[in-house]
Amino acid sequence: MLEFTENLGNRDDLQPTERLTLAYEQRGKCRQRLRLDSGQEAGLFLQRGQVLREGDVLRAGETLAVVHNAQEPVVTAVAPNWETLARACYHLGNRHAPLQLGHKWLRFTPDHVLEELAESLGLRLRRENAAFVPEGGAYDGPHSHA
């Protein structure tokens, strides 16, 4: 089993031979057992506190794998205007729900309470499969591996 112990960051100068497609929850766990896209079993043993991002390159000895965001079930809530979007972000943020923000839309993982709240605030909901990349939060510093 490959043991990935080092995150080299988003590097264009490397040629990873493996791919690792991870859902949002998996990208936040630094110790876990998983499968590469090739089907090979692997273990993740990274420094605590890291969140993996699209394009990060992981090292297991001589093997390099690139991280990709998985398509996963999400709810995309579309606002008719910026005021409605701001109000929804405020109320959903008060529930400490991870949110991905776009142009007059926000995205969260399926949750009937959040869905009812979003609809009551005037957002139009769409269930779909998409990469979920929520905002890091106020204290999510720059992504560095120095």
Image (cartoon, rainbow, N blue to C red):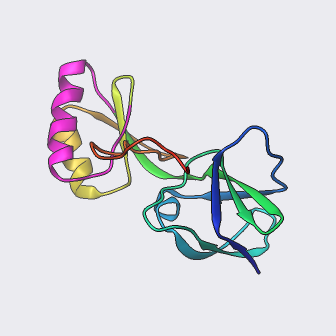
Please name whichever residue, 110 or 90, is drawn nearer the observer in this view of the structure. 90
Name the side, left or right, on which 31 lies relative to 42.
left
Position in image of residue 5 (x %, y %): 64, 69
Quadrant of res 138:
top left
User: Is 97 contained in the magenta span?
Assistant: yes
Position in image of residue 119 (x %, y %): 22, 40
Please name whichever residue, 24 or 17, is drawn nearer the observer in this view of the structure. 17
What residue lies at 79% left-to-right and 70% top-to-bottom?
39
Quadrant of res 13:
top right
Name the side, left or right, on which 54 lies relative to 61.
left
Name the side, left or right, on which 78 lies relative to 120.
right
Please name whichever residue, 1 or 13, is drawn nearer the observer in this view of the structure. 13
Residue placed furthest toward the bottom: 1
Position in image of residue 78 (x %, y %): 34, 30
Which range is magenta? 78-101
Quadrant of the image containing the N terminus: bottom right
